[in-house]
Image (cartoon, rainbow, N blue to C red):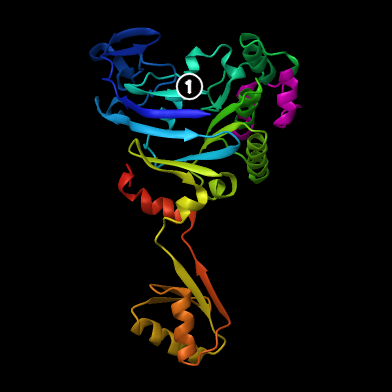
């Protein structure tokens, strides 16, 4: 189980030094590489142009609280820049929070011995040495976490890389790197798993495989926390959602409960008689509803199915179809995070 309580992370000030050829130099003398910054805060920190870095003092995560329960797949959603990756790094102790706590089964991840036996994580599929083979990469992780070497072959087979384990990672496609990252997360057979955009780069077969894997892991009683931008994938995979924007919690509830919060409900209406359809449109618009024609059907907003059926009955209009539609997960997400979008 993952517990996040009042977690806050404030961006630090940019370093006054640039790193050039392994040597730290003042920014004014850094030469051609002066436009690049390496943060000393933590490995893997943002190294983009200084002009693109967040302003010092700004909150990346703002008093964030939620729980991720075992036995369920929990999706982690938010617009770009919402703070999802920062929150995952805070849970794993890769960044230090300004305030608040993040615990795994009641303890900070840094306090857990042989971490891969407790938590498996895939944060960045590219964060591996391209000159190593997949087998060598996993063997090193196994040795440092007291994991039997036989697990290396088992997880490579499980993710479909059994025949590519002795190939150098530098020659892997993005989809293969994602599978390798998932294999590393599974290596210690941990009860808690975190994945950041795990299906990015996977082909349709791979996406279907990953979906089934996450569902199976949750069915085994594990805690599965998956960050993704793919609403359709979360709709098919997740049981619960944690949605954030600008570092703050927007929702933490089941997928069904979140989708029900959307207001973009509509009703599809079809009648076999074109003249009757025109009469129905006039009646609906007179009631204040909005009607759009979609391939021989009417898409109605502003009136529910019961009201439309009653109007059709009063006007003697036979209906061949009357179907109510709730907001999709994607529509609800766009609606509830509209004020939290960083880049338009």
Relative vertical location of residue 263 with respect to residue 120 in this rendering, above or below: below
Q: Which residue is mark 1?
A: 92
Residue 119 vertical placement versus 299 (above, below): above
Q: Position of residue 334 (x, y in %)?
A: 40, 52
Which range of residues does the magenta coloring cover?
Answer: 151-177
Q: Is residue 22 left or right of residue 151?
A: left
Residue drawn at x 35%, y 17% as measured from the top left: 39
How would you rate the neighbour count of disc 1 (Cα within 10 Å): few for under 14, some for 14-19, many for 20 or more?
many
Helix, strand, or loop for circle 1? loop
Q: Nearer the viewer, residue 125 or 155?
A: 155
The percent position of residue 27, horizontal first and vertical second, equals: 26, 14
Residue 159 visible in the picture: yes
Residue at figure coordinates x 25%, y 14% from the top left: 16
Name of the residue lying farthest toward the front? 106
One can see residue 200 in this view: no
Residue at 28% of width from left, 20% of height from top?
12
Give percent across and percent down for residue 72.
58, 39
Q: Is residue 153 magenta?
A: yes
Q: Is residue 84 above or below residue 312?
A: above
């Amino acid at each position: 189980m993952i517990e996040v309580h009042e977690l806050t992370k404030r961006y630090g000030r940019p370093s006054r030094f640039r790193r050039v050829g392994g040597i730290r130099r003042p920014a004014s003398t850094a030469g051609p590489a002066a436009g690049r910054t390496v943060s000393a805060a933590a490995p893997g920190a943002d190294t983009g142009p200084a002009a693109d870095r967040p302003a010092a003092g700004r909150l990346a995560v703002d008093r964030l609280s939620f729980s991720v329960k075992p036995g369920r797949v929990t999706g982690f959603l938010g617009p770009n820049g919402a703070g999802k990756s920062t929150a995952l790094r805070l849970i794993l102790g890769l960044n230090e929070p300004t305030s608040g706590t993040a615990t795994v089964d009641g303890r900070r991840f840094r306090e857990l011995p042989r971490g891969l036996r407790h938590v498996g994580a895939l944060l960045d599929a590219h964060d591996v040495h391209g000159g190593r083979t997949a087998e060598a990469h996993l063997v090193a992780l196994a040795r440092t976490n007291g994991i039997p070497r036989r697990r290396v072959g088992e997880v490579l087979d499980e993710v479909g890389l059994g025949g590519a384990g002795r190939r150098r990672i530098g020659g892997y496609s993005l989809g293969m790197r994602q599978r390798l990252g998932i294999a590393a997360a599974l290596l210690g057979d941990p009860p808690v798993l975190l994945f950041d955009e795990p299906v990015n780069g996977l082909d349709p077969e791979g996406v279907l495989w990953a979906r089934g894997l996450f569902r199976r892991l949750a069915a085994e009683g594990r805690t599965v926390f998956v960050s993704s931008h793919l609403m359709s994938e979360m709709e098919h995979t997740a049981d619960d959602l944690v949605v954030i924007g600008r570092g703050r919690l927007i929702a933490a509830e089941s997928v069904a409960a979140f989708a029900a919060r959307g207001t973009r409900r509509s009703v599809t209406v079809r009648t076999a008689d074109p003249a009757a359809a025109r009469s129905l449109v006039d009646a609906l618009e007179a009631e204040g509803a909005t009607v759009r024609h979609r391939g021989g059907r009417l898409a109605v907003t502003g009136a529910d199915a019961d009201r439309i059926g009653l109007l059709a009955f009063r006007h003697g209009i036979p209906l061949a179809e009357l179907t109510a539609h709730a907001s999709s997960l994607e529509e609800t997400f766009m609606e509830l995070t509209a004020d939290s979008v960083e880049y338009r």
